[in-house]
Image (cartoon, helix red, strand yellow):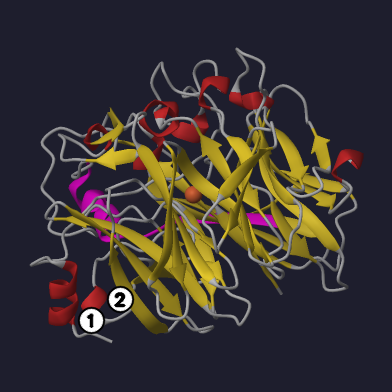
């Protein structure tokens, strides 16, 4: 393990300042409702109204992170990524569902609470007279995901540190330094668990014109085991990654960073350029192979698996980065305000011969985002669940539907709540008696209420076995996790 000085030298930088990268994806509402306005700073615990029979042996907490605080002192951020993180918890116990939520007490949030206004520049919008940032965590809103690693719960951004959260009270313990050498360095919102219980993660960091990917390996208790900074040939945007038995799989996209007046202005999509699939050997974190593919853009991956010499992994693939630069804004060009289908991704399976580097792509011809798998079987070919996106031109985000797709068999399942409902990231969950379910939150856009829906895994088309509804609409969120009791 290098000490901090050695690590910074390794990174070729004199300080831990760097790329203010961050992203996430919620293709959820229009900009005109409560989900995007200023919100209460906490939601006290309330009980939701259950419809149907909520299984009593499904016990635990669904944690979700929302970019909730988008408005202060008359200023409203114009990009969904700029809201301060709020941890929402849906507690399942005794056949009932309860909800509560709390803002993440980041440095940014506390400073802005004291000032009574936004102080720091967002990624897609900037408040008046913004202060400059001292490091990557100065304006860290901790707003993309919330994950449990070991027995700890973390609110995650991607351009700076994780924040540890009390899983019971939702209070913020504070910023996490994986080591003294790694203070303020990027740690993505999408850590992945290995078959042995270890956790892997990446951070995209650009400093002094050199892009690097920091690769972290943590043990099952979320203690740092290894870290390495790997130079990149191009400063492409990376939000997440994939993991196979042998490899850490990076897709270095053709959305290229170069200094601009704000973060989103700093990226341009190089349609004539390339994206790179970079296979890192998990044994020594060396670059095993780099494979050029046509320019693409991706936030999220399905799982990876190896079939002999063939490495397979799925991604929700975009033809360009418009979804990041425009689609997730809250202005007239956003996916929320107009035709959402122009920002659709396609769930595609890449198949790579790891000896020859030859690759091919299998198209699902299905638009999906927020893909998830059964994390208990990370390297097994399996159905991917996610938000299906309507493909008819002119469709809105309130026409999303629940979708399951198996990348090898092309078996698919769909459940559509119908127009007016916006669904959020679905997760596989397991009851105490071993029953597998799919769980997700959703909003009824007409009644402005948030709900939670439960399906039997493998039986999505049959509709939810139970639902529960709040009296109001909670902020939309990006990602989360289920922690069974
Ligand atoms: Fe994400």
Residue projecting furthest to the left? 14
348 left or right of 71?
right
C-alpha span from label 2 to label 1? 6 Å
- Give the x, y percent position of residue 392: 67, 16
- Callout 1 crowding tier (Cα within 10 Å): few <14, some 14–19, many ≥20: few
**Rendering quarter of residue 111:** bottom left
Residue 471 or 159: which is nearer the viewer? 159
**Rendering quarter of residue 160:** bottom left
Q: Which residues are magenta?
A: 98-117
- Callout 2 crowding tier (Cα within 10 Å): few <14, some 14–19, many ≥20: some
158 left or right of 95?
left
185 left or right of 293?
left
- Say which quadrant the C terminus sits in: bottom right
Residue 75 or 198: which is nearer the viewer? 198
Residue at disc 2, secondary structure: loop
Quick check: marks 2 and 1 in contact, CB under 8 Å? yes
Which residue bears the numbered disc 2? Answer: 177
Which residue bears the numbered disc 1? Answer: 180
Vertical comparison of 316 with 103: above or below: above
Would residue 102 be counted in the magenta stretch? yes
């Amino acid at each position: 393990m290098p000490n901090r000085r050695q690590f910074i030298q390794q990174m070729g930088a004199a300080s831990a300042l760097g790329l203010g990268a961050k992203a996430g994806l919620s293709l959820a509402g229009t900009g005109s409702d409560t989900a995007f306005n200023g919100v209460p700073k906490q939601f006290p615990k309330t009980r939701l109204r259950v419809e149907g029979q909520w299984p009593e042996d499904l016990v635990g907490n669904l944690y979700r992170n929302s970019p909730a605080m988008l408005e202060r002192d008359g200023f409203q951020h114009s990009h969904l990524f700029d809201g301060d993180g709020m941890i929402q918890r849906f507690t399942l116990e005794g056949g009932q569902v309860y909800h509560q939520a709390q803002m993440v007490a980041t440095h940014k949030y506390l400073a802005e609470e004291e000032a009574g206004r936004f102080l720091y520049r967002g990624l897609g919008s900037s408040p008046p007279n913004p202060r400059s940032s001292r490091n990557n965590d100065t304006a860290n809103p901790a707003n993309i995901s919330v994950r449990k690693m070991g027995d700890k719960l973390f609110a995650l951004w991607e351009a700076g540190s994780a924040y540890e959260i009390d899983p019971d009270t939702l209070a913020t313990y504070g910023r996490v330094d994986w080591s003294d050498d790694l203070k303020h360095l990027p740690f993505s919102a999408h850590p992945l668990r290995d078959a042995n219980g270890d956790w892997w993660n990446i951070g995209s960091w650009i400093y002094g014109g050199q892009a690097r990917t920091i690769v972290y390996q943590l043990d099952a208790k979320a203690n740092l085991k290894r870290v390495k900074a790997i130079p990149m040939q191009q400063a492409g945007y990376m939000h997440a990654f994939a993991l196979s038995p042998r490899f850490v799989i990076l897709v270095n996209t053709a959305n290229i960073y170069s200094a601009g007046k704000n973060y989103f202005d700093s990226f341009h999509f190089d349609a004539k350029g390339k994206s790179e699939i970079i296979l890192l050997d998990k044994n020594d974190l060396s670059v095993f192979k780099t494979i050029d593919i046509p320019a693409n853009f991706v936030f999220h991956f399905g799982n990876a698996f190896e079939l002999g010499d063939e490495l397979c992994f799925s991604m929700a693939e975009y033809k360009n980065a418009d979804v990041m630069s425009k689609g997730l804004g809250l202005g007239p060009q956003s996916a929320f305000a107009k035709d959402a289908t122009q920002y659709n991704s396609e769930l595609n399976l890449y198949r790579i011969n790891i000896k020859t580097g030859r690759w091919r792509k299998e198209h699902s011809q299905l638009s999906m985002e927020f893909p998830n798998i059964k994390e208990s079987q990370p390297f097994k070919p399996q159905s991917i669940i996610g938000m299906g996106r309507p493909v008819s031109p002119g469709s809105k985000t309130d026409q999303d539907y629940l979708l399951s797709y198996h990348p090898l068999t092309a078996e698919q399942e769909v459940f559509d709540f119908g127009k007016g409902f916006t669904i959020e990231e679905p997760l596989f969950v397991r009851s105490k008696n071993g029953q597998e379910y799919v769980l997700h939150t959703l909003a009824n856009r007409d009644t402005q209420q948030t709900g939670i829906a439960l399906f039997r895994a493998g039986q999505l088309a049959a509709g939810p076995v139970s639902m529960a509804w709040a009296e109001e609409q909670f902020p939309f969120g990006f990602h989360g996790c289920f922690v069974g009791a």
